[in-house]
Each structure stands twice: as C-alpha cells, then as structure tokens.
Image: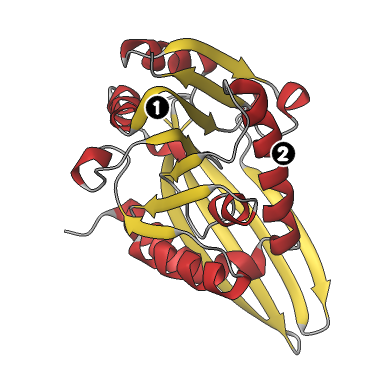
C-alpha cells in the first residue's frame, strides 16, 4: 500500500514552482534572509549554521539557506520532492546535500546532528493522529546538538478553526503563455480537528484550461497543542513567535535541546 502523503507530494512537486504565483527564486532568497536574521537572534552565536530541513519539499527554505552560506542537509519523505529540490539546487548553484527521510523517524536515516532542525510551510500539520506531534518532535530532537534549536512554522489555525473556511489560498496570474489559477477547498472533519485539503492548479493555454487536483489530510493544530507536545518531547525554552515579531509569513515555534 502506498503512503497517501508521499503520493500527494510526489504528484504535486513537479507543478509547485510554476503554479504558486510568485517569483520563486526571489522568494526563497527573501525567506532565507528573514530566517537567518531570526536565527541570529535566537542562537548563542551568529551563523552560518549547520541546518537540517527535515520537510524541505521542493527546497523553498533549504536552497535559500544554502545560498545564504549555511551548511544544509535537506530531507523529505517524498522522493519526487527531493528530486525536484536537487534539480533546483543544481540550477541555482546551491552547495548542499539531500536525502529521503520521514520526520517521525529521522534517526533511522540520518546519523549526523545539527545546530538547527527546521520544518516550515505547515508541514507539521500532517501530524493528524493523537501522539504524532510528540513522535515528530522527539525525532527532530535526536538530530539536534546539545543546545540546538528546533524551528517549526505553521498556519495560524486559531481564526481558521472559528471560521472553518471552505475556499482559501487563491491566486490568479496572467502570464504571456497563459493564465494560472490556484486555490484550495477544505472539507472539515472531526468537528474542527482535521480537514481534507483539495489543492487545485489550473493552467490555461490558448483558451483551454487544464486542471490538476491534489488531496491530503491535515490537522488544524492549536497553539497549546504545539507547546504541550514540545514540552512532552523534552524541549526547553519553548516559544511561539508571531509574524510581527519574526518577520516570517507564518507563526514560528522554537525550542531548545537542553
């Protein structure tokens, strides 16, 4: 039986860069600058740092951080995403390493330890079952040096749980070769705990529209869930940072391996 999360990212990753509606290269460089400045404020010394991006996807954070001078090992459970990320890294001249790994069991695939382990872009929301968060954070902790930092970014689910939106994350872009549309449809389950995320990517060519649909299940993680799971996993100095504080586009949670 195939893993539905791997299938989701294996099929989505070839379309991701083209359909996200932004200058991807400029965006990854901008995110790397913001994350580096944030890390410099949270670490005991300024970088560059030895980093593990354990949910790298197509490399949005990992490649930018490598270009910024950090030593980066990038992993993901999706071989297709790793293939796309490695291609982009080569194109952009980023010196880094890659591997396939599941953030529930990083110690099985990675022997090295790092100053920082990060997981961005709401990847942590794939922890849909009770206990998944503690398992993931415990796994990440095994790959941290003593005093190392875990950094996780995720959606601010508090207002979304109240609103329960069905239609979100929309953009329309008119290009010389045709229009691009992207949006998500959410089907809420279990009250307000989980939802089915239907990602639609639509490409127009000469008036004809080609539709791609990708589906995955996510958990609407509350702030108290995140902090409690990190505490149970043995982290110290756990903090929630708003975008206004960090400069990053999503809330960030940090904690230390002490």
Residue 196, quarter of picture: top left
Foreground residue, 258 or 250?
Answer: 258
Left-right relation of 200 to 231 = right
Residue at the farthest bottom position:
206
Query: Where residue 147 sits in the image (x, y, percent)?
Result: 43, 19
Residue under the point 62% across and 66% down: 17
Front in this rendered view, residue 169 or 97: 97
- Residue on which the image places disc 2: 34
How many angstroms separate mark 2 from mark 1 (CA)?
Answer: 36 Å
Asked which quadrant contains residue 80, the reply is: bottom left
Please tell me whether residue 58 is drawn above or below residue 104 in the rendered image: below
**Disc 2 crowd, CA 10 A, few/some/many (<14, 14-19, 20+):** some
Residue matched to label 1? 190
Q: Earlier in the sequence, mark 2 or mark 1?
A: 2
Judged from this view, the residue extending furthest toward the left is: 1
The residue at the point 44 percent across, 55 percent down is: 215
> As drawn, is 119 to the left or to the right of 250?
left
Q: Quadrant of the N terminus?
A: bottom left
Picture layout, residue 70 above or below residue 148? below
> Along the horizontal axis of the image, is 166 left or right of 12?
right
Q: Element at badge 1? A: loop
Identify which residue is drawn at 48% across, 50% down.
72
Q: Position of residue 211 (x, y in %)?
A: 58, 73
Marker count (numbered)? 2
- The spot of residue 246 in percent (x, y) is 71, 27
Instruction: For the residues labelled 2 and 1, say whether their Cβ atoms are less than 8 Å apart.
Output: no
Mark 2 secondary-structure assignment = helix
Residue 249 quadrant: top right
Discs 2/1, front = 2
């Amino acid at each position: 039986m195939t893993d539905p999360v791997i299938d989701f990212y294996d099929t989505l990753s070839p379309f991701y860069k083209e359909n996200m509606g932004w200058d991807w290269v400029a965006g990854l460089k901008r995110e790397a600058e913001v994350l580096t400045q944030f890390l410099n404020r949270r670490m005991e010394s300024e970088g560059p740092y030895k980093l593990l991006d354990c949910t790298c996807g197509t490399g949005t954070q990992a490649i930018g951080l490598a270009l910024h001078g950090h030593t980066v090992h990038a992993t993901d459970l999706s071989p297709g995403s790793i293939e796309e990320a490695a291609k982009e890294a080569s194109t952009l001249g980023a010196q880094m390493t890659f591997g396939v790994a599941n953030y529930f069991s990083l110690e099985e695939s990675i022997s090295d330890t790092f100053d920082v382990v990060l997981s961005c872009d709401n990847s942590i929301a794939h922890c849909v079952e009770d206990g998944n968060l503690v398992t993931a954070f415990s796994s990440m902790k095994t790959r941290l040096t003593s005093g190392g930092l875990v950094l996780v970014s995720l959606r601010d689910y508090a207002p979304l749980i109240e609103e329960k939106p069905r239609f979100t994350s929309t953009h329309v872009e008119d290009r010389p070769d045709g229009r691009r549309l992207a949006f998500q449809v959410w089907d809420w389950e279990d009250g307000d705990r989980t939802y089915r995320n239907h990602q639609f990517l639509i490409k127009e060519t000469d008036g004809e529209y080609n539709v791609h649909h990708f589906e995955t299940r996510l958990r609407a993680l509350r702030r108290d869930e995140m902090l409690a799971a990190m505490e149970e996993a043995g982290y110290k100095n756990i903090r929630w940072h708003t975008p206004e504080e960090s400069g990053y586009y999503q809330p960030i949670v940090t904690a230390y391996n002490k």
